[in-house]
């Protein structure tokens, strides 16, 4: 999807710094389900959350639940699982991004 989103996630969510942020070193979080799963795991561990993922015909919705199983304000609905996770993670960490960042 977007290397810009991948780099924002790497820096602000996964903790990459300096040379690690060179584009070729950053996983494809926004397009690879395995890499996106690592992001979701990190977010869940950070705040002691659980993730609820709903796969629809044309969308994926990812919602964070608190440790009591209650819905939080963190939910995203996008056309793919990796993108939904990335946007949820960026919003969770209060990272400024724009829809222009979605274009490579």
Image (cartoon, helix red, strand yellow):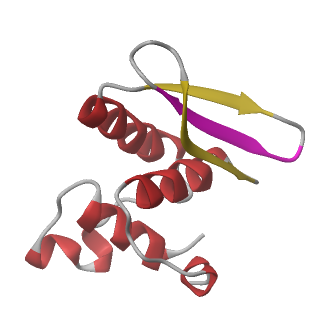
Q: Residue at x 29, y 56 (%)?
A: 13
Q: Is residue 28 visible?
A: no
Q: Position of residue 64 (x, y in %)?
A: 51, 33
Q: Is residue 22 left or right of residue 96?
A: left
Q: Is residue 26 left or right of residue 89?
A: left
Q: Position of residue 32 (x, y in %)?
A: 52, 50
In the image, is residue 62 part of the stretch drawn in magenta? yes
The magenta span reads 58-65
User: In terms of secondary structure, what is the magenta stretch mainly?
Assistant: strand
**Compared to 86, does 60 lie above or below?**
above
Which one is nearer the viewer's eye here, 38 or 76?
76
Which one is nearer the viewer's eye here, 71 or 43?
71
In the image, is residue 19 part of the stretch drawn in magenta? no
Q: Position of residue 8 (x, y in %)?
A: 36, 71
**Compared to 104, does 63 lie above or below?**
above
**Compared to 53, does 7 lie above or below?**
below
Q: Residue at x 63, y 80 (%)?
A: 99
Q: Is residue 4 visible?
A: yes
Quarter that holds the C terminus: bottom right
Which one is nearer the viewer's eye here, 8 or 92?
92
**Compared to 12, does 39 lie above or below?**
above
Q: Residue at x 22, y 74 (%)?
A: 21
In the image as oriented, which residue stretches furthest toward the right? Answer: 57
Q: Quadrant of residue 54?
A: top right
């Amino acid at each position: 999807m977007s290397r810009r989103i991948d780099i924002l996630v790497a820096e602000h969510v996964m903790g990459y710094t300096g040379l690690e942020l060179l584009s070729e070193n950053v996983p494809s979080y926004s397009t690879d389900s395995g890499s996106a799963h690592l992001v979701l795991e990190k977010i869940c561990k950070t705040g002691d959350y659980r993730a609820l993922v709903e796969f629809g015909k044309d969308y994926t919705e990812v919602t964070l639940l608190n440790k009591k199983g209650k819905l939080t304000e963190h939910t995203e609905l996008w056309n793919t699982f990796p993108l939904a996770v990335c946007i949820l993670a960026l919003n969770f960490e209060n990272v400024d991004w724009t829809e222009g960042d979605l274009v490579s």
